[in-house]
Image: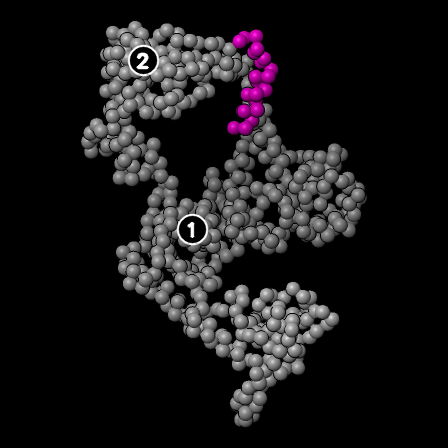
Amino acid sequence: MISLDKLRKRSGLLIVGIGVAMGAFLLGDLMSSGTSLFNGSQGVLGEVNDQVIDYREFETEAQNIDRIFSGRQDRKGLRDNLWADKVNEVVMGEEYSELGLSISSEELAQITFGYNSGEMSTTARQFFGVTGQDIKPAELAAVIQQIQDNDPQRWLYLENVIRKERLGQKYSSMVRQGLNASNLDADSYFSEQGDQVSGSYLFKRFDTSVEVTEAEVSSYYNANKEDYPQDASRELTVAIFEITATQADKDALKSRLEELIEDREVYNKTAQANETLEGFKTTNDAASFVDRYSDTSFDPTFYAEGQLSPSIETVLRNAELGFVFGPYEEDDSYKVARLNARRNDSIQVAIIEIAMDASEETANEIYAQASELAAAKNGEELEALAEEKNIALTTADVQDQDQSVSGIGDDARNIVFWAYNDETELNAVKLEDQNNRIVVAMLTDILEEGSQDIDEVRFQIEMALKREKSGEALTEAFSKGLAGASTIEDLAVAMDLVPQQVSDVDFNTNAIPAGFEPNVVGAFCGTEKGQLSNPIIGNNGVYVVSVQNAKEAVEGTKNYTSLKQQLDVQLTHY
């Protein structure tokens, strides 16, 4: 039995584990640096089926969900989920309304609390921490009352998630139940599985050396543009400036640590006199010394043999108290270690650690280089500057839902938003400071949804035309040969070809020795025994087939119930 105390503890945390598609995302830095998800200046985030999604309401909901999740959700991975939920709510809400799908209060109580049925939803079980155990109604009621009193928004969020989850389940169930195989479907399926043919075919490969004219290419393209779709995309040219310490920076950090080891004399401007500052080696309070000068706090742990870093294990384990080792490099930092105390076989080590970060001077210099590149007015100027400064450029094509960008990595969602903003024009440049690096990205091309440019698909069009023209010529040649042939052998002599054999071909076969040819397989299955087919244009050339033997499925093995069950399984997986 799960305890009330455990439930109370879980109630504030386990919602983080709710794994539902319509969960939420953190709005995060939508308003920072002018890189909003959409342009919210007019108060409109977007429009779905004529329903406006208000920017401020969206932001408020996102911030509330962030609070409910206690900031534990990955910002990049969840950034679009709330928007997707809004789209789903509008689109599917219309479907639910037309179908009359709804969730009553009693049903919601059943799946939320297991009320009157024990039918608690998976989401509710995760929220309350219920596994396979029963739960006392009084205990559950107490937790629910506590949440409703102390955090009603959390409770409303849970109810909303569970309601949407159940509506989606009802809709899917209705669709699945409407997909049922009939006896006619079972008959066709039985024949497709059991009927087999054997025979032979003649084949002539397409002649891809035929000439095509520019007028033919243009005409074919205009008539078949829909066959060459183009998704909306943006091309970015990107430069990455890593802010890393130079050797001079590292030497300065090392010198800074060396100065801390021994006592040193400094001039006190206030007292107008020299004074001595104690060093790491002589201080009587190593803990305070570390906290004052190190990037990390003093660690009071006593370490047994073998538990310290190999860099200092041996030298400090055998040293005298107060011995100082270093500076030494470890984990991208310079460190100085002092043997501070012993306790039996364990030792306490005080470590001053300073990360090998770039100096402010170095960072400013790198930022100046990035700013100089970001001043480019177009792609040619950008490339010229990059070549002059020996700066590497990469090119990336991005779609509006991309979370990462080639060359930048996962920390690129803001740049994708910027690239798709209506106010971002061609050759615009974005300079973004990402902690230890600076990204310069230029929008070098904008492709809207539609058809690919003719030059991009010219090769495919030319090949299609050559296949088409060659196919017509080969079909005509086969047709002339068929006029004087009654068997596949007669036609082979007339066409100077050798028949190829196939055995036990059924409707589910999609290949023959000549290659992937579903149309040719269909011709075999549709040609009467002893007959020659008409010429068939396949993937690799033109064919004529002849069926010598046909075996039908044994009727006595037909089981409608079993066949329809097999088809029902296939239907519900589409």
Residue 58 located left or right of residue 489: right
Image point (45%, 68%), residue name: 245
Three-letter amino acid code of the residue under disc 1: Val
On residue 157, the disc is none
Of residue 419 and residue 158, the one placed in the foreground of this image is: 419
Of tags 1 and 2, which is closer to the observer? 2
Q: Mark 1 = which residue?
A: 405
Q: What stretch is highlighted in magenta?
A: 554-574
Q: In this view, does 365 lie to the left or right of 67?
A: left
Left-right relation of 281 to 199: right
Establish if 345 lies above or below 209.
below
Q: In terms of secondary structure, where does tag 2 sit?
A: loop
Name which residue lies at 46% across and 72% down: 250
- The quarter of the picture where residue 501 lies is top left
Q: Distance between the residues labelled 1 and 2?
A: 52 Å
Q: Is residue 483 above or below residue 297?
A: above
Quadrant in the picture for residue 459: top left
Badge 2 amino acid: Asn
The residue at the point 33 percent across, 22 percent down is 538
Rendered location of residue 362, percent (x, y): 42, 71
Q: Is residue 563 magenta?
A: yes
Residue at the spot of label 2: 534
Q: Position of residue 273 (x, y in %)?
A: 54, 93
How many other residues sit within 10 Å of disc 2, few (<14), some (14-19) or many (≥20)?
Answer: some
| Residue at image coords 55%, 86% | 264
First in residue order: circle 1 vs circle 2? 1
Are there few (<14), some (14-19), or many (20+) residues within 10 Å of tag 1?
Answer: many
Task: Pinpoint residue 121: horizontal percent, then vertical percent.
Answer: 67, 38
Q: Do the residues labelled 1 and 2 touch (CB within 8 Å)?
A: no
The answer to whether 530 is drawn above or below residue 233 in the figure is above
